[in-house]
Every structure is written in C-alpha cells, then in structure tokens.
Amino acid sequence: MKFLKTLSVAGGLAALPTLALAQDAAPGFDEIGPYIMTTLLFLVAGFLVFFMAAGFAMLEAGLVRGKNVAMQLTKNMALFSIASIMYWLVGFNLMYPGDFNGYLGPIFGTTTWLEPVGLSAADAALDYASVASDFFFQLMFVAATASIVSGALAERIKLWPFLIFVAILTGIMYPITGSWQWGGGWLSELGFSDFAGSTVVHSVGGWAALAGAIVLGPRIGKYKDGKTVPMPGSNLALATLGTFILWLGWFGFNGGSQLAAGTVGDITDVGRIFANTNMAAAAGSIAALALTQIMYGKVDLTMVLNGALAGLVSITAEPLAPSLFASLLIGGVGGVIVVFAVPMLDKLKIDDVVGAIPVHLIAGIWGTIAVSFSGSATIGAQITGILAYGVFTFVVSLVIWFILKAVVGIRVSEEAEIEGLDKAELGMEAYPDFTKG
C-alpha cells in the first residue's frame, strides 16, 4: 500500500506520494517468470501462425489460373477476418467453456467487451499465461482451418456463399469438435491424442473441403473423355514462396502447442518440436521429389511443394515424442501419400485445385495414426477420434453445402467460370497487363 505524508506549506498542507512499502514490493522473476515466458510463447507462436495466412494466400494464388488470382486473395483476406470475429463472438466459449463475460457489453470504460472468457480473474492469478495471448494463439488455428477449404474449391465457387460457410465453420463447427480434444471433452478423456492438430485442425478443414468439392463438382473441362486435363497454375514462384512461409509458420503452429515455456524442460521440448517439424517437412519434400521422378520420369514441383506440406501435417499430431529419424519416416510417408492421393482423387473426379484434401485430410489421418507408434495413445483411441471428426465434419458440411446450394446457389455461372472469377465476380484482375488465363 501507499501512504501520504503531509507537510506544511505556506500555512496549508500538501500531500506527497511516497514509495511503496518494502513488504509490498512487486513479485520477483522467479514468481512471474513462467507466466511471462508462456505468454510470450503464445504471442510469438501466434504471429508465426498468423503469417501462415500469407502462406496460404500465396500458395493458392500461385496454383490457380491467372483469371482467378484476385478472387483467391480476396477469399483469404475475408476468411481470416471472419474467423477472427466469429471465434471471439461464439467459438472460443464453445471450445473452452468457462466463466462467461457476455457476448455484448459496454463498449467504453470496461474490458469485458474486448476480452475473452475470464481474462481478468485468470491473469490476476499469474499462474499460467495471459488468457488474451492464449485466445490469440488459438484463433490462428481456426483461421488456418478455413484456408484449407478455400484452396480446394477455387475457381468455381461464389464468394458470399463460401464466406457464409466460413462463418459457420469457424464460429460453430470447429469449436465444437475442438472442445472434444483440446477443451477437455470426451475424446480427451478417452485417450485420443492430437498434439497440434493433424486431425483437430487439418483433417477438419480437409473433410469440409471434400464435402464442398463433391457438392460443387469439378471445374469445366477438368475431366474429359475419361482423362484428366491439366490446368497449370499461374505462378509457381508464388506457390513456392507460399510453401516456405507455411513451413516457417509451422514452427509456431507446433512449437506453440507445447503450451508452456516456464521451465527448462518446456523450452527444451520446444526445441525438439522445431527440429522434428523441420525434419518431417524435408522428408516429405524429398519423398515427393524422388517418387515423381521415378513414376513420371520428371520431377513435379507442385508435388514437391505439397509433399513438404504433407510432411508437416503428418508430424503435427505428435511432434515431440518421435526421434529425428522417426520424424523423417513420418514426414516421408506424408510425401508419398500426396503423390498417390492426387491422381486417386482425379480418378474419382473430385476436383481439388491445390491438393488440399491429400495434404490436410489424408496426411492428417496418417499423422494421427502414427501417434500410436510413439506410445502417446492407443491405436483404438486414435481411430475413434479420426472417425468422430470425420463423420461429424463431413456430414454437417455436406448438409450446409446442400442448403447453401438450394437457397442461394454456390457455383458461378458457366460464363463467369470461363471468363474467370476476377472479372465476373470482382470486376478486376490480378494481372491486368496479361491476357492469358
């Protein structure tokens, strides 16, 4: 407490503040250090994962045709913004039930309008981390889930129906299923394990994308006379840049999921997670590079890029427990999955423009199963989790896509698709100096 000392000045009294009493000194670093370090982990990891939004945008912009680039960039800007608002408004409280400050409240003079559940009380305890930093970190994950859907359905979906789906996905669907594992729900109690989201994030996005691709149908001319017609992307340099940005952001994605940095052991584990994450990405990339050379006689850059991403998705379910060699094997299998899964989807006439379903759904399932090899969970618990997430997300997504199709329509007209969504939907072009589609 502070006290006042009074002095006589010109017949009056003046109140002068003094220093705080010694016994009320601020707590030392030993006391608040873990709180500070874990809060910083959430913030640093969070903005690394935020940068993945740029990675998704560049990857998609590079893999779609030039006449649809501006639309993909618009979708990525909009979906991140919608996810941010919906996760604050509804999602965080669904995913992590707790004391509720209210959806709406006074705008000025209080923090309850801006801050998520129980912020003041939790921070006052100084026993873990700032809830605001935790909210920020978790928000980045839900935005990544929506980005997965964006790429798979590119070049033929209307903007506004897609954004309506994003609002439902990020505000309701993802938080409900996320609570099953990360909110202490029934899958967590069953023993299901998903360290950073091979299933909770990536396969959820993949299942939603698969449902959308089935309802939407393939692009005009993609499948002709029983053959798959190649539709090359507009800019492989951008796609490569996007992949490297995603690779960088993944260190925050997996490293931040350690959820603690207050001890030497915590920081050591974050370092191991970084090393394993990198190894899996490298192995996935090399596996795809070698396999495309063997199968097609030439290396396919798009497969190499998606191989790296598949390696990252594969290790995400358990990036701490495996050795570096085991991480190499896990990531390498992810790269192999992509090379075989992309043509498999084409045979089924499921048009996935950027390869999101092989990378995020199929590799995500593999990575979740691989957790059982490290002893972190039983194979039964992992398969139960995979099925639960798959059935719920696919069925609910399918219903929503069908409702949107019936009510407002989800696919652009044939004329608009041929012209390109940039001109038809937005009235602008990403590359106005070039006319090639």
Image (spheres, rainbow, N blue to C red):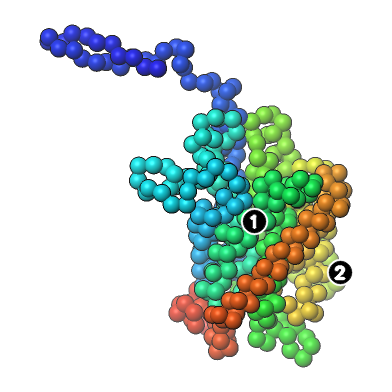
Q: Is residue 160 left or right of residue 285?
A: left
Q: The N terminus appears in which quarter of the rendering?
A: top left
Per the image, the residue denoted by label 1 is 176
Q: Is residue 6 above or below residue 282?
A: above
Label 2 residue SS: helix
**Residue 356 shows up from this direction:** no
Sequence order check: which comes first, mark 1 or mark 2? Answer: 1
Q: Position of residue 154 (x, y in %)?
A: 61, 74
Q: Nearer the viewer, residue 340 or 233?
A: 340
Say which residue appears at 79% left-offset and 88% top-offset.
226
Q: The C terminus appears in which quarter of the rendering?
A: bottom right
**Residue 160 shows up from this direction:** yes
Label 1 residue SS: helix
Per the image, the residue denoted by label 2 is 294
Q: Is residue 8 left or right of residue 70?
A: left
Q: Position of residue 65 (x, y in %)?
A: 60, 77
Within-10-Å neighbours for mark 2: few <14, some 14–19, many 20+: few
Q: Quadrant of residue 235?
A: bottom right
Say which residue appears at 82% left-offset and 49% top-offset.
371
Q: Position of residue 199 (x, y in %)?
A: 73, 56
Say which residue appears at 78% left-offset and 64% top-offset.
362
Say which residue appears at 65% left-offset and 36% top-offset.
260
Within-10-Å neighbours for mark 1: few <14, some 14–19, many 20+: many
Q: What's the distance in space between the residues labelled 1 and 2, CA to CA? A: 43 Å
Q: Quadrant of residue 263?
A: top right
